[in-house]
Amino acid sequence: MCVPQKPSGISSDDNANPIAPLDHIGYMQLALSEAHESPPKPSNFRVGAVLVDEGNNKILATGFTLELPGNTHAEQCCLQKFAERNDIPEERVGEVLPDKTVIYTTMEPCGLRLSGNMPCVERIIRTRQGGKKGVSKVYLGVKEPEKFVGENTGRAKLEEAGIECIHISGLEEEILRVATAGHE
Ligand code: HJL
Ligand code: ZN
């Protein structure tokens, strides 16, 4: 499958975004190209994510599983990278996110992590706590396979918190192939 190259020099002041507004497949392909960067590991999935300001079609951050030091998830890396660039800790990133922030992720955000780390669902919901605008929508490429935590409650938890979740279909096969590379 043809995956678009990652736009160079992505940052909050970069307006050279090759993806058209609301081109969900285009953004999901970018998330998938991020997932390809993730090192294969038998104990988790290789996921890619893109944090987008849907209000003006700006890429805020990209991320992939294990991109940042430690046992980091793709969605977590997006939030941490954007927070770092804005000199704020990740737990306060909601204070600097634009009004219409959305996240594209190749896999449904995790509601539980075997490692006991904070799940991405809690990190995403936290961006909206205390009256902050935060992440308002999640576009996901596949549901999490029942391999590590059984049925993932991630999507349900996000929806309970008022965060819309939209499945973008069409790339499932490639997303799962990339996600499970390195598994038995
Ligand atoms: C999502 C990721 C990633 C997963 N899911 N949405 N993004 N790695 O970047 C979900 C899977 C957990 C396991 C192991 N994977 O990752 O359920 O070691 O990776 O905390 O539960 O937990 P740890
Ligand atoms: Zn996660």
Image (tube, rainbow, N blue to C red):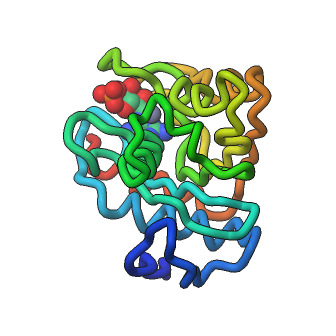
| Residue 153 relative to residue 163: left or right | left
Single out the residue that lies furthest toward the front: 87
| Above or below 95: residue 33 | below
Image coordinates of residue 8 in percent, x first then y, are 39, 80
Q: How many marks?
A: 0
Whether residue 111 is visible: yes
Q: Please tell me in which quadrant of the rendered image residue 58 appears.
A: bottom right
Query: What residue is rendered at 27% in x and 32% in y?
Result: 43
Quarter of the image for the C terminus: give it.
Answer: top left
Query: What residue is rendered at 75% in x and 47% in y?
Result: 166
The residue nearer to you, when weighing 40 against 155, is: 155
Ligand 2: give its quadrant.
Answer: top left
Image coordinates of residue 16 in percent, x first then y, are 54, 84
| Residue 75 relative to residue 104: left or right | left
Q: Please tell me in which quadrant of the rendered image residue 124 appears.
A: top right
| Residue 72 relative to residue 91: left or right | left
Query: What residue is rendered at 78% in x and 38% in y?
Result: 164
Image coordinates of residue 102 in percent, x first then y, are 66, 51
Single out the residue that lies furthest toward the top: 116
The residue nearer to you, when weighing 41 against 98, is: 98
| Residue 69 relative to residue 179: left or right | left
Whether residue 179 is visible: no
The residue nearer to you, when weighing 168 against 77, is: 77
| Above or below 6: residue 161 | above
The residue nearer to you, when weighing 182 against 12, is: 12
